[in-house]
């Protein structure tokens, strides 16, 4: 921690690796492991972050810890540029951790955006359709509806409708 605070990220990561190898798998310690995995991710050690997050997910006895680890795994793959794998990992949040509707919602929205980037419009529409069905009267339902309009226009080769997502200020 001292090395981290002084800005020596490399030395901090080296000591965190040693710490991780000696750490038991108790829930209170998993929170610290999560912090370290996030530090790996922030310092572009995505593979180490993913490996640690997979261990956390396997050892977590509460659904929230497992869901958070799964979501961050999606982020790590997204940062690596493996967008297909990132979308797959985000969607695991929605079926493996269904007790967290907010987490599932955020994961679906990330997966939808990734499918858009990959020009996989049918998959994006399917994800957004689920969001619309589950969150009809919410801001996210509105955003999903707008994204579906854009995807359909792209698929038809038509100009994209000018949409302003809720919360965006007009320019």
Image (cartoon, rainbow, N blue to C red):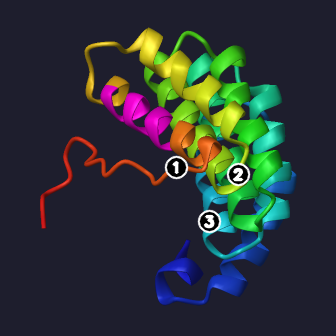
> 156 or 102, which lies in front?
156
Element assignment for label 2: loop
Q: Nearer the viewer, mark 2 or mark 1?
A: 1
Relative image position of residue 68 (x, y in whole percent): 59, 35
Q: Which mark is residue 19?
A: none
Mark number for residue 119?
Answer: 2
Q: Secondary structure at mark 1?
A: loop
Query: What secondary structure characterizes most of the magenta part?
Result: helix
Vertical relation: 167 (above or below) 105:
below
Q: Closer to the observer: label 3 or label 1?
A: 1
For the point 49% across and 33% down, the residue is 148
On-image quarter of the C terminus: bottom left
User: Disc 3 and disc 1: Cα gap in Å?
Assistant: 44 Å
Q: Position of residue 9 (x, y in %)?
A: 63, 83
As measured in the structure, the alpha-carbon distance from the residue carrying label 2 to the one carrying label 1 is: 15 Å
Dot 2 alpha-carbon crowd within 10 angstroms: few under 14, some 14 to 19, many 20 or more = some
For marks 3 and 1 on the same chain, the one whose residue lies earlier in the sequence: 3
x 61%, y 58%: residue: 38
* Picture quadrant where residue 65 is located: top right
Which tag, 2 or 1, sits closer to the chain's start?
2
Which residue corresponds to mark 3? 39
Label 1 sits on residue: 158
How far apart are the alpha carbons under marks 2 and 3?
Answer: 31 Å
In the rendered view, does 84 fall on the left or right side of 148?
A: right
Residue interval drawn in magenta: 142-150
């Amino acid at each position: 921690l001292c090395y981290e605070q002084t800005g020596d990220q490399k030395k901090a990561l080296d000591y965190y690796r040693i710490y991780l190898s000696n750490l038991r798998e108790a829930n209170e310690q998993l929170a610290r492991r999560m912090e370290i995995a996030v530090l790996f991710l922030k310092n572009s050690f995505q593979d180490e972050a993913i490996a640690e997050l997979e261990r956390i997910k396997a050892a977590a006895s509460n659904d929230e810890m497992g869901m958070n680890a799964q979501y961050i795994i999606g982020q790590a793959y997204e940062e690596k540029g493996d967008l297909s794998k990132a979308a797959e990992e985000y969607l695991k949040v929605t079926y493996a951790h269904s007790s967290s509707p907010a987490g599932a919602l955020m994961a679906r929205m990330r997966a939808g955006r990734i499918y858009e980037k990959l020009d996989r419009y049918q998959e994006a529409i399917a994800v957004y359709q689920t969001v619309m069905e589950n969150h009809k009267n919410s801001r996210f339902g509105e955003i999903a509806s707008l994204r579906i309009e854009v995807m359909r226009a792209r698929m038809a080769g038509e100009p994209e409708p000018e949409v302003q997502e809720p919360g965006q200020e007009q320019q």
